[in-house]
Image: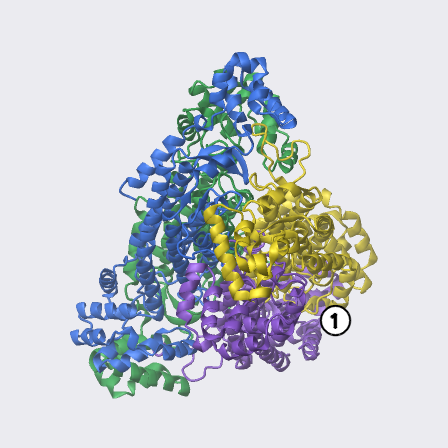
Chain colours: A purple, B yellow, C blue, D green
Amino acid sequence: MLDFELALMRALVHAGLAPQTAADELAGASDASALDIGAIGRSSGEKGTPVPGLLSALRERVGEIAAAHLHQGATSQDVVDTAVMLIARRSLSPVLDDLAGAADACATLAQANRDALEPGRTLLQQALPLTFGLKAAGWLAALDTVRSELSYQRDHLLAIQLGGAVGTLASLGDQGLAIAADMADQLGLVEPDLPWHTNRLRPAQLASSLAITLGALAKIARDVVLLAQSEVGEVAESGGAGRGGSSTMPHKRNQVSAVAVLACAERAPGLAATVLGAMAQEHERAAGAWQAESEPLRELLRLTGSAAVSAREMLTGLTVDHARMRANLDLNGQLLMSESVAVALAQSIGRARAQDLVEQATRQSVDDGRPLREVLLELPEVADGLGPERLDEALDPARYLGVTAELIDRTIEAHGSPRG
Amino acid sequence: MLDFELALMRALVHAGLAPQTAADELAGASDASALDIGAIGRSSGEKGTPVPGLLSALRERVGEIAAAHLHQGATSQDVVDTAVMLIARRSLSPVLDDLAGAADACATLAQANRDALEPGRTLLQQALPLTFGLKAAGWLAALDTVRSELSYQRDHLLAIQLGGAVGTLASLGDQGLAIAADMADQLGLVEPDLPWHTNRLRPAQLASSLAITLGALAKIARDVVLLAQSEVGEVAESGGAGRGGSSTMPHKRNQVSAVAVLACAERAPGLAATVLGAMAQEHERAAGAWQAESEPLRELLRLTGSAAVSAREMLTGLTVDHARMRANLDLNGQLLMSESVAVALAQSIGRARAQDLVEQATRQSVDDGRPLREVLLELPEVADGLGPERLDEALDPARYLGVTAELIDRTIEAHGSPRG
Amino acid sequence: MLDFELALMRALVHAGLAPQTAADELAGASDASALDIGAIGRSSGEKGTPVPGLLSALRERVGEIAAAHLHQGATSQDVVDTAVMLIARRSLSPVLDDLAGAADACATLAQANRDALEPGRTLLQQALPLTFGLKAAGWLAALDTVRSELSYQRDHLLAIQLGGAVGTLASLGDQGLAIAADMADQLGLVEPDLPWHTNRLRPAQLASSLAITLGALAKIARDVVLLAQSEVGEVAESGGAGRGGSSTMPHKRNQVSAVAVLACAERAPGLAATVLGAMAQEHERAAGAWQAESEPLRELLRLTGSAAVSAREMLTGLTVDHARMRANLDLNGQLLMSESVAVALAQSIGRARAQDLVEQATRQSVDDGRPLREVLLELPEVADGLGPERLDEALDPARYLGVTAELIDRTIEAHGSPRG
Amino acid sequence: MLDFELALMRALVHAGLAPQTAADELAGASDASALDIGAIGRSSGEKGTPVPGLLSALRERVGEIAAAHLHQGATSQDVVDTAVMLIARRSLSPVLDDLAGAADACATLAQANRDALEPGRTLLQQALPLTFGLKAAGWLAALDTVRSELSYQRDHLLAIQLGGAVGTLASLGDQGLAIAADMADQLGLVEPDLPWHTNRLRPAQLASSLAITLGALAKIARDVVLLAQSEVGEVAESGGAGRGGSSTMPHKRNQVSAVAVLACAERAPGLAATVLGAMAQEHERAAGAWQAESEPLRELLRLTGSAAVSAREMLTGLTVDHARMRANLDLNGQLLMSESVAVALAQSIGRARAQDLVEQATRQSVDDGRPLREVLLELPEVADGLGPERLDEALDPARYLGVTAELIDRTIEAHGSPRG
């Protein structure tokens, strides 16, 4: 808010509407730590906005000329909206940095584990094999998309607010737009085409993008928590001293960072909904909806920042257990490979008949408790049409990965490109 | 879903994985109206997805070869996700058309009422004058922004889904990506870098943009409802025969379209929150979150479409009452112009002293029930420093509109540019 | 959290599981202001919960025996859940007090304005007359319902949490339930049938009730803001010195309290949705959902408290302008009374014919710009069947109020009953 | 809606305001299947409510007298609100029946598995042993609470709406309340103290309770999905023919019912938030918020009904695998029992020292890959202070269950009590 008032004063000086001394005096008095925040808070309760209290406090600390020109042409909402945009701008830089770190960690995981077989799981049931590298590539793709979106918003969406009481900038005569442009330049924010006092696309877009970012992080954290279950054990956060451990339950390895990400993300939809629900603002300043917006927005910024830090920690320190992955893949014997056998068999006997045969063999294998391979080789269509060697190939998970390698390459390559 | 299966079959044919007859047979059987929707629905309850029931129904209607190749390489989610994207693509065209019509109507209103004075209102209290043209320009700017966003999403975000059970496209060997590209081309959707089975940025972004569109429409509708209040009467929807009237209360003019817009928009934040909240999807297919997504998404598409139609009707038929606007502006005599007088007076006696003087005069005017002009002219600073003529200029709302004209021009001009 | 640990220690002493000195030592060290909150916060980041840090801090400040027994049998979630319940219990008392004050103010308004005619409004259009007393009675009924609900929850829903790591209270042997009962008694909370670590009905019910309370307050505040519009002017918040005024726009009377209520309430649905959405908690302690619950719950408590204070201020100081109410009622001449005339006329000529006649007369009155009474008296059915005197009665809003008086009486009487 | 109109007509007859023939004629014409729903829908678009179209359709099908008295005294919202309440009343009975079935199944599971040991899990990590019976008892307690709440709401919250245009019942003279009471009696709904056109506590409370019910069901379904994971395998839904199976992946056992419950519940918070957010309704009828309420409410009723059916199926057919439970419990050797050993040891050497010793032994056991028992017995404090026999007792999960049995008994007993 101080930055707003100072930029406004300087713009007034540039426009010839205030003397240079006014800006100098205000600059000298713009030390947030010297303000009585409690008093401003109490006045905020009285007035419904902190701005009058802030202005009083500043006027006490500057000379008459600065006092007279302070806040000239602006309305309280101009100050608060611009302040929120500045907070967003400053918050997004570390967020983007942490997201880049998290994405880099995903790229490393995707590359390092590109051949690490594990069961792919649908509805939490093992389905077909994939590699952990592909899973990490999926995480990477999501992170790179949200990074690109947040970065775009930081540079193109975050705008100054300056409209005066009803958006006409009436008290600045014909210099309103020049002053707005000057302030945008000073503050590193976009100059909007129109004041957006009750046109709340900017807050709504920002809130949505933050919620989407948190959702993308939560997907990764959910996977980590599930993969780290005692009974699954495929990954774990790196412990660090005492981190996530329990003195009374030494076997536990709580995934502290992943849980933190999930806890942050759980709150995002409700907060975003509040900002989206506040868009129908009355006339030139809303009675309630506007005032309800800034806390959820700032909370979303805080939660995104916190989740990005945790996600980066989680991903950079993730330990991967290839042996457990393989053991889990073999949990149901070779049943996971039945589709692969059917595909191989289809070449000689057609797709429909191949599926039928394999389905019967699979059932028999389960009922008799015998290996699928053994049951299959008793079938003439398999023994003759496919033979043991090609059957073994069909039963090898490493040979039934489709376009896994291309997908990993594609994603890592895109990550390396300039937008990364 | 039929379009998906047919495009897949054709792509299989192109790739040499299925014979041409399979595609021909399927094309001949792909008549949605001939399917037993009830049976597919019942099977959906059993299986948790409508796809197996649909495939059974199709297999009964095609020959053996088409039956064998039907759905080859795909998983149920591939079908459902692509179907939702196709629904979105088809829904967005009429939505964009109606939004364009609504925006054009705003541009007309902004131009036609650029000088139509009315009170600007903050917290539902009259604040300073503006023109109805500026209010309409604000509506226009919001509509043009959401149009641009939705149009971008239609062309760049809506993507095919094809990944097979766990996103590796394993059963299509090394041809998975070629087939996906072929299908995207056939269906007019984007080909994604990776299958997005549990990377739900697309649904989340679409849901957010639809909710933001509804929010932008709701802001306009709220203004209309408030301006049309019996006690305000500045605008009204065009009646049409019996529209919005009440047989028992003939004086009422319900703003049927505006209320419809508000009712649609009221539901958007909750629906968007559901889609945002469903992003943390487990592994390669979610257990619940994915299945919860498509109804809210389709509901948002329906509500946006409905609200866009209503908004267009509301705006194209809006009647504007300049006399009531002026009467409302004069409701508090000249009090609304006190800031303007202070600005004028500041040139001679400084901003601080001018504000004090005008504040005192205003209070006295209210207390004594005398016109502000009269009270002001008794002050030597006004009588001498400003004089009656310049005081009258300062009291004229039409001269205290700041950059209103530039803002209107800017917005209409941007609307006329190619992105409109 | 300190209260929890102290109550637990005392219960351990009562059960013979810890010596009296342990409780005495802990009591001596339980001064929240002496704790290093920053250090506990940092540890919370490490461990994912503030409890281990709190326990370390306490252990440093007590002797060995107290240190050994501190927190015995409890898990971190026991502490946090109980602490939130204690916060709720303590918060609800002032909330209930302010709601009682607000309800009393409504009762006074209902009584004092029981005959104050104003237009009833539907879809923001004048519809039929009612009295402001009836409107206030509607507010009162809502407040008394939410008071009753919140009061019930305070006394019957807010429960202690004590289950140990997985809800079995294993480390307390067979004394777990006795200790839980003892603690509930000490802390003034309910003893639950079962630990509710992942059975989150209590937080969800509390969050819902708080959101409903905020919704009920928002309905009142919305009415006040609308009635206080410059063009309506039927009520206004009492100003107080400078309250809601604007130095540059002296004619404005911002409804600061009403706007504050609306701003608080706007956030409630999103916060409640977060708590509702966090109910599906995994196994014996959730990975994320539980951790996300307490901030929204505390925020809802804070917002409800703040809105209750504002609502009480708004209602106790509300000024009512009977003259404006009557003027607004007469805005459309006697058109508002057409239904009343039709009802009166129906007694002689039947309902259908009466409605037709009045509808025609009303239209003619509007078209010709003549008073409805005059037009009606030209109709033989009215002149003869009703006569001028009974027509005047039918045109008198004060005689067309149906059961208004009974409804007001009923509500005031219910308010006076014990549950008030 | 037909039931409303018919009950109103009968009440008018009872009150002497309409002749008996009017009610007889209307009763004869009240066959919903004979109405042109499409035409009513189109009229609804015109008028903003389906009621005028319905009334027109009815008037065409009855004689003049019934037509004249049809809907007398009512407003459209009276019809729609009462209709939603009737839908709720009729929906809640099967919901309550299915919830009772689900609760009974939980009681059976709790009893049958009261001693079935499995690992208790916190943050998805094994923590301490419990029994599956206790887990089922926790589910049961939640179901019994929501049943009690929904049952209360059905009987005490669902109310008739009758207020006429602005809630005064003006056109019914002094008989409005008698007619409302009569209708409530006919329709089996509560008679409210006041019309609740813009006092939306009833819809908000109903929506919240339904969302809470869905949340309680989702907690159970989440546990089932997690317990049924390929790598955990402790429970499974009963398959039935083809249910949840996959022709191409025969090893999969999708938990179709559990996933269906989760999918329904995922939508609840957003829908409840919409109803909560619609509470701030303007004056005597809202412009948008009211119109937005009924679809989410009906959707919540539908989702709750659907989830209750699925939950009942899931729970009544749940198969439980005690061997897998025990195997999972033994996954980490005896590490899960370290807290138990520390508790046992504390009796001789104090709690602090016991915890230290066990922690060291546990770490050594992990580092050396030796059984915890072996390491512990090398410590003199254990060998002498506890001895092998009492150590074995301390290492036995079945002896470290605290108050598990009492909690199960308590919950089953409460379920058997009248409220069940």
Task: Out of C22 and A17, give the one closest to the viewer.
Answer: A17
Near-viewer residue (C35 or B386): B386
The answer to which image quadrant residue A107 occupies is bottom right
- Place residue B225 in its image quadrant: top right
Q: How far across and how far down the image is residue D83, in percent?
A: 50, 35
Q: Nearer the viewer, residue C191 or B217?
A: B217
Percent coordinates x, y for residue D345 in the rendering: 25, 79
Q: Position of residue B384 (x, y in %)?
A: 58, 59
Label 1 Cα neighbours within 10 Å, binned few <14 / some 14-19 / many ≥20: some
Question: Depth check: B239 or B371 in front?
Answer: B371
> Would residue B79 appear left or right of B21 to someone viewing this image?
left
Q: Amino acid at mark 1?
A: Asp
User: Which residue is denoted by mark 1 in the rendering?
Assistant: B174
Q: Assign a secondary structure to mark 1.
A: loop
Q: Is residue B127 visible?
A: no
Image point (58%, 45%), residue name = B330
Q: Give above or below for D10 relative to C14.
A: above
- Number of marks in the image? 1
Classify residue B44 as left or right of residue D139: right
**Subunit of mark 1?**
B
For the C terminus of chain B, the quadrant is: bottom right
Residue B328 visible? The answer is yes
Q: Residue at x 53, y 69 (%)?
A: A68
Q: Position of residue D262 (x, y in %)?
A: 51, 56
